[in-house]
Image (cartoon, rainbow, N blue to C red):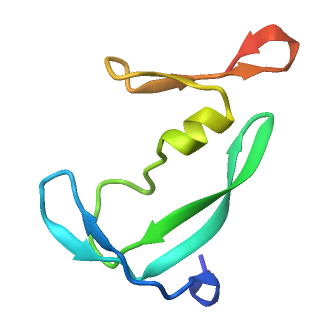
């Protein structure tokens, strides 16, 4: 993605879902796009193999007024016109 120059080199300790701990390469701010909401979100960058492209947390869900479903692993949020995204 050629974003290496935009990474803020700040090391954080991060614990994974399996309990293993790793140190981050840094953080990067990227636009999160959930139509019609576009907002800047911080992401921690790690140099590890992961099944996830990115993990979005509660602050992002709150910004889009989302409701999560653990059963269906989905997020629903209101969009213009009274519809649901």
Image-based side of 76 in relation to 15, left or right: right
Residue depicted at 38% across the width and 26% down the height = 73
Please, is residue 85 above or below residue 32 in the view? Answer: above
* Furthest-left residue in this view: 19
Front-lying residue, 76 or 1: 76
* x then y, percent, for residue 19: 12, 57
* x then y, percent, for residue 76: 58, 20
Residue depicted at 49% across the width and 40% down the height = 58
Residue depicted at 64% across the width and 68% down the height = 29
How many numbered discs, if any? 0
Please, is residue 17 above or below residue 80 in the view? Answer: below
Residue depicted at 48% across the width and 47% down the height = 56
* Furthest-right residue in this view: 81
In which quadrant will I find the C terminus? top right
Image-based side of 1 in relation to 55, left or right: right
Please tell me in which quadrant of the rendered image residue 11 appears.
bottom left
Please, is residue 78 above or below residue 52 in the view? Answer: above
Front-lying residue, 39 or 12: 12
* x then y, percent, for residue 1: 59, 76
């Amino acid at each position: 993605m050629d974003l290496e120059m935009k990474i803020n080199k700040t090391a954080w300790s991060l614990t994974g879902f399996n309990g293993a701990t790793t140190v981050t390469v840094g953080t990067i701010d990227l636009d999160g796009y959930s139509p019609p909401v576009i907002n800047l979100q911080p992401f921690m960058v790690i140099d590890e193999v992961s099944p996830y492209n990115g993990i979005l947390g509660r602050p992002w869900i709150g910004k889009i007024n989302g409701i999560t479903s653990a059963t269906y692993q989905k997020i629903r949020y209101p969009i213009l016109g009274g519809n649901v995204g």
